[in-house]
Amino acid sequence: MAGEPKLTLDPSVEEFEGLDAIPFLVDDIRVAGSRPDLEALKTEVIEGVRRAYTLEGLKNVPEIRAYRDFFWRVGIDPTKTRPAGEALIRRVLGGKGLPTINTLVDTYNLASIKTRIALAAFDAATLHGDLVMRKGRPGEEFLGIGMDKPVVLTGEEVANADDAGLVAIYPYRDSARTAVTSATRAIVFLACGVPGIPRDVLLRAQDVTRDLVIRFCGPSSQASA
């Protein structure tokens, strides 16, 4: 794809009043394995999470509650498939550290924790045309990152698609076709909102994500890596 990303909401998702998402492009990036300064930030974020949350109270945080409610509406059990921010926070509260995957994934994981907003990430070079958010179609197949075989949609799901097909089951699983890798140079992010999450919260998530990705994966970051 070329230029700034666009997202259209299809009439099939009009039943979800307040459904919203913000696509944005971050380009000219380089992905590394790890960085000492990023690991230091992880430690800082982990300490902040343990001060700010408890396992018992986490489900009542407004953004997490909104995602949970939405998951139930689209046929996903949020006690088994956790919203991304909640899953990472629960991991930390359970005494575990944050995984080291690469500087890009680690960075937007931190952004998701800081903002409690789910983030989808697509390699811009693999997208074809603009994005659309729509209901899944019964019988439609989707192959997500880390999946051995495609799942078959029921038609209850909300999905993101480009001109070549599905790129995500919204807002929790991105497709293998558009996955970011160490060779990725430009990323289309999606700050994933659901009913009950105001747009200004999504805009903050966009700013936090962009700033962190540029800080740790942007051109000026390479000299200090």
Image (tube, rainbow, N blue to C red):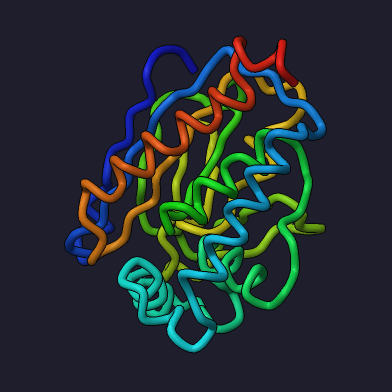
Q: Is residue 179 above or below residue 201?
A: above
Which quadrant, please, contains the C terminus? top right
Judge left or right: residue 136 versus residue 108: left
Q: Is residue 77 visible?
A: no
Quarter of the figure with residue 82: bottom right
Q: Which residue is rendered at x = 31% and y = 47% of the image?
A: 202
Residue at x-position 45% and y-position 30% = 210
Residue at coordinates 61% horizontally, 39% vertically from top-left? Answer: 107
Instruction: Give the percent coordinates (x, y) of residue 216.
Output: 62, 27
- In the displayed structure, would residue 51 be above or below residue 121? below
Position of 150 with respect to 23 (left or right) is right
Pick out the residue farthest to the bottom: 56
Say how many tags the image has: 0
Image location (x, y in percent) of residue 79: 55, 83
Question: Quick check: can you spot residue 164?
Answer: yes
Provide residue 62's location: percent of width, then percent of height: 31, 71
Q: Residue 108, image x and y in percent?
A: 57, 42
Q: Is residue 147 above or below residue 30?
A: below
Q: Residue at x 21, y 55 (%)?
A: 198
Is 22 placed left or right of 164 in the picture? Answer: left
